[in-house]
Image: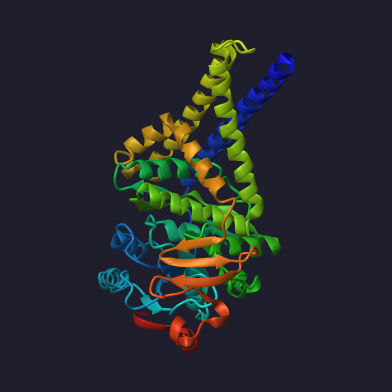
Amino acid sequence: MEAYIDLFYYFAAAAAVVQSFLLGMQTWEHRRYVRSCMKSLDCHQPAGRVLVCAPCKGNDVNLEDNLRALLEQDYGDYEVAFIVESEFDSAVPFIRRAMAAHPWMPARLIVAGRAVDCGQKVHNLRVATGRLSPRIEYLAFIDSDARPRPEWLRMLVARLQRPKLGAITGYRWFVPQSDSLANRLLYSLNCDLMALLGRSSHHLVWGGSWAIRRQVFELVGLHSAWKNTLSDDFTAGRVLRDAGLEVRFEPACVVASPIDNNLREATSFLRRQYLLTKLYARQWWLFAVLGFSAANLLWLGNLAVLAWSFCGGPVSAWIPAAVTIALYLARVYRGAVRQDLVEVYFPHLKKTLERCKRFDVWLNPLVGLFHWTVILSTTVGKHVNWRGIGYSLFPNGKVKTIWRADEPTTLPLASLTKKHSGEWRVKSGAWALSGRR
């Protein structure tokens, strides 16, 4: 019996070491690809009118600075549409101030009204892209909690003319505004996930920073595909995959995203992300469940064998001790490689992120355990809370019901009236509070 236990342990330990080695190779390759792409930014000078869609809701951390950065891109032919649900949204004053500080920029504020059959963000995007000017050649999308670099827009559209390329996507790099444990966990976890990205994003689009040609947007019917859905980016990735078009990750389009969360907020944010993954990209959700379960069970199992060996177990103590050290050093190596990218992505944030960098390098096993518990929590549940709005979804990802803090009960979509939903604004078309062309 002990021989079988030994054999099983050796096999599991070998699998853990191989997994760590492969992840280390992927992290190294991510850094190599990023460095290669970031060397040639100035040589890309695309042309063509771009409509930048920026849905906003609430007061994000440093919101006005984020909006100003969007209006200060080094691309000469673009316009910005800031889209809100209501003119009473707390983001509106910040949008107006940012627009007033850049009177030369073609920008407008669109009030889309309340969503009645899809997520509010999706509804905002459908309204903004419903009637496009003939001048628009590209569509770019960015979240209000993202702060793009000056070359962000230029690099988003620079490669879109390549054949078989459907979309360009970036990603986020969290910038904690305080040294809370929740912020450090989110920072490290996000860096870990980002290191999995390479030249191809495997049709994964991140909705906070991406672009598509208008011709492709209309060809794949994305505007219609968004109807009744909650996720703009997973839906975009699906229709592009079905059309046989590639999605490319562009390092220059990674955006800084200021955060300041407590542990409850951080957990809620991660749970929502994985619930959406479960509903819209189940294969990736299963991959995450199995991958992180294997990594953490192997890590914890090896620690258990190490403790057992000191109590007279069948395995000599030096073997699990060596495996533990090897696994930990592999995590340290991956963390060091990831954090080396701060000088590539955001050199001006090097000092700001110093403590978070050390946390990611030396305490990454704790991050992995936190990440794993959140993923496991999404094995049950179909309810998503997003920016103060609750959604209940069918197993296929279609929105079933929507409820809000200012509505006394949950309203099925079929029972929504003009009084409850503000549908009169949607039917009569979005309208602009102010704008310049």
Compared across the picture, whether 71 is left or right of 47 comes to: left
Measured from the top left, where is residue 60 in percent x and y? 34, 60
Is residue 316 or residue 27 the one in the foreground? 316
Q: Nearer the viewer, residue 307 or 258?
A: 307
In which quadrant will I find the N terminus?
Answer: top right
Q: Is residue 50 above or below residue 298?
A: below
The mark tally for this picture is 0
Q: How is the image coloured?
A: rainbow
Q: Tell me where residue 421 appears, x and y as whole percent.
A: 46, 81
Residue 42 in sight: no
Left or right: 72 in relation to 194: left
> Horizontal placement of 149 versus 195: left or right?
left
Quadrant of residue 289 in the image?
top right
* Above or below, 35 relative to 113: above
Figure quadrant of residue 291: top right
Query: Relative to residue 135, is residue 330 depicted above or below?
Result: above
Q: Of residues 343 and 240, which is closer to you in this image?
A: 240
x, y percentage for residue 228? 58, 73
Expressed as whole percent of the image width and height from the top left, the position of residue 288 reads 60, 45
Please say whether residue 305 is visible from this viewpoint.
yes
